[in-house]
Image (cartoon, grey):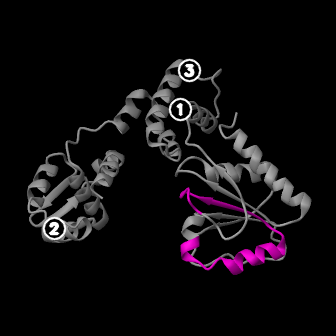
Amino acid sequence: MNPREAEMTKICDFISSVRLNKIFNALLISGFPGCGKTYTVNLAFQQLKLKPLYFNCVQQPELAILKQNTQFVIMDEIDIGLRKFDLKPFFSRLQQLKCGLIMICNELQTTPPVPCDNMYMQQFSQTQLKTLCLLKLNLTEATISTELSESLDYLCYQVSKNSDARLLDQYLSSKDLSIKYFASLFTTNLSINEYQAKLILLLDKYQQTTVEQLKKDLENELDNDFPQVLDWLKKLETTKILTLKGKLVEINQQTFKKHKKFITDLAEEAI
């Protein structure tokens, strides 16, 4: 069963209504990142065997070109698009063509300049994430082993705390789906604070830099003075996450990737 069956049914009903009535109509789908908004919309169009014009407002430098036979348009990251583009002429053209418009956004307070229906997608529950895992692995509860089932339960519990189901593809791509492997992804022995985590992210951003440049970057980005940067670097070197080569500092990508989620989450507390 699709964990977003109810939402997909509503989207399919919206699409069918536009096709039947041949009028412009819009649907705004909002929800936190990774809750399956784009995934569910794409699945609905696949089920109806339709090919909409998909447009990501973040990735595309210009608005999509509308053709006379355009029936449906998906505008992803519309909250960004409203700030990036002048959308009134674009929406006016959609109305002339009597297209169906589906807008997807993360910001819950987004208000497009066109009348639209609204749908809010809740974050995935642990049970829904388990269903999603089984779909991705082409398995069912009846065919899955007890060991793998328990392993997926652990994975879904951890992902549910982050609420970003997009991480599942990354985790399930491994040949090792054991609890031991998943535990290694979610546990960390890094004893660092939020500013040290921010420092690590800066290192990853610049790949190779100097101690002086890091001090400057930290002062600019965190609006504070950090005379202890060198002490932090020496401490972090003991965790194998970076290497000091004289005045040069270089990130250890293998160690960084292992702890990336922990570091990123912790660094957000410094903002």
Q: Residue furthest top?
A: 146
Q: Is residue 138 above or below residue 206?
A: above
List the residue tagged with mark 2. 215
Left-right relation of 257 to 197: right
List the residue tagged with mark 3. 145
Say whether disc 1 or disc 3 marks the residue closer to the N-terminus: 1
Q: Is residue 126 above or below residue 40?
A: above
Q: Residue at x 25, y 62 (%)?
A: 203
Image coordinates for residue 19, horizontal then vertical, percent: 87, 59
Q: Which quadrant would the C terminus be assigned to in this image?
A: bottom left
Q: Which amino acid lies under the numbered mark 2 shown in the image of this protein?
A: Lys
Q: Which amino acid lies under the numbered mark 3 shown in the image of this protein?
A: Ser
91 magenta-colored: yes
Say whether disc 2 or disc 1 marks the residue closer to the N-terminus: 1
Give the magenta part as a residue range: 82-110
List the residue tagged with mark 1. 126
Label 3: how many Cα within 10 Å (few below 14, some 14–19, many 20+): few
